[in-house]
Image (spheres, rainbow, N blue to C red):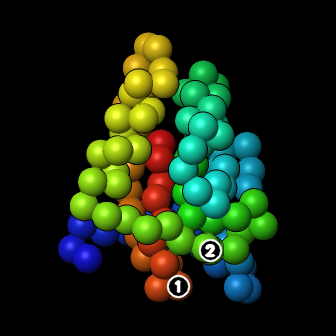
Amino acid sequence: MSNLLPLYGLLRKVGHKLMPESQHIEYKKSFGKETIISLVSFANTSGGKVIVGVGDNGMVYGIKIGPETIQRFLNEIKMATYPQLLPKILVEDRDGKSVCQSS
């Protein structure tokens, strides 16, 4: 997949898991309403990153990324927020699974 961008500094492994969640990092197993709520929370504070495809425990589950997935995520975020929030979304393979970072 040539559209993958590296997230090496953020997704550092600790054993078989990723770094734990923090004040600036939130993991979501899948994209949905909770993802958008976390993005809005970060936008209203000092910022942060939401990583989709990773469980709260730091285990990488991955998500299916199709040709329109990122655009669909952006559209859902845009339609659910006012003023409209348009985050950057980066994709990376981690342990053979795709994860998305939104900030």
Marked residue nearer the N-terminal end (2 or 1): 2
The residue at the point 43 percent across, 76 percent down is: 93
Q: Vertically, is 97 above or below 69?
A: below
Name of the residue lying farthest toward the top: 83
* For the residues bearing labels 2 and 1, Cβ distance under 8 angstroms: yes
Q: Residues within 10 Å of mark 1 (few under 14, many from 20)?
A: few
| Residue reaching furthest to the right | 57
Amino acid under disc 1: Asp
What residue is shown with label 2?
60
The total of numbered circles placed on residues is: 2
Categorize mark 2 by other alpha carbons within 10 Å: few (<14), some (14-19), many (20+).
Answer: many
Which image quadrant for residue 69? bottom left
Of 86 and 9, nearer the camera is 86
Instruction: Please name the amino acid that badge 2 sits on.
Output: Val
Q: Pinpoint residue 76: horizontal percent, then vertical percent.
A: 42, 35
Nearest the viewer among 84 and 30 is: 30
CA separation in Å, label 2 and label 1: 7 Å
Tell me residue 40's x, y (percent): 58, 28
Q: Is residue 80 visible?
A: yes
Picture residue at 47% right of the left edge, 85% below the top: 96
53 relative to 85, above or below: below
- Image quadrant in which you'd find residue 23: top right
Q: Position of residue 49 (x, y in %)?
A: 56, 47
Circle 1: element type: loop
Residue that label 1 marks? 95
Quadrant where the image shows the N terminus: bottom left
In the displayed structure image, the side of residue 94 where residue 38 appears, left or right:
right
Q: Determine the residue positioned at 73% across, 56% down.
A: 21
Kindly state the secondary structure of the residue where label 2 is placed. Answer: loop
What is the number of the mark on residue 68? none
26 left or right, relative to 99: right
Front residue of 46 and 26:
26
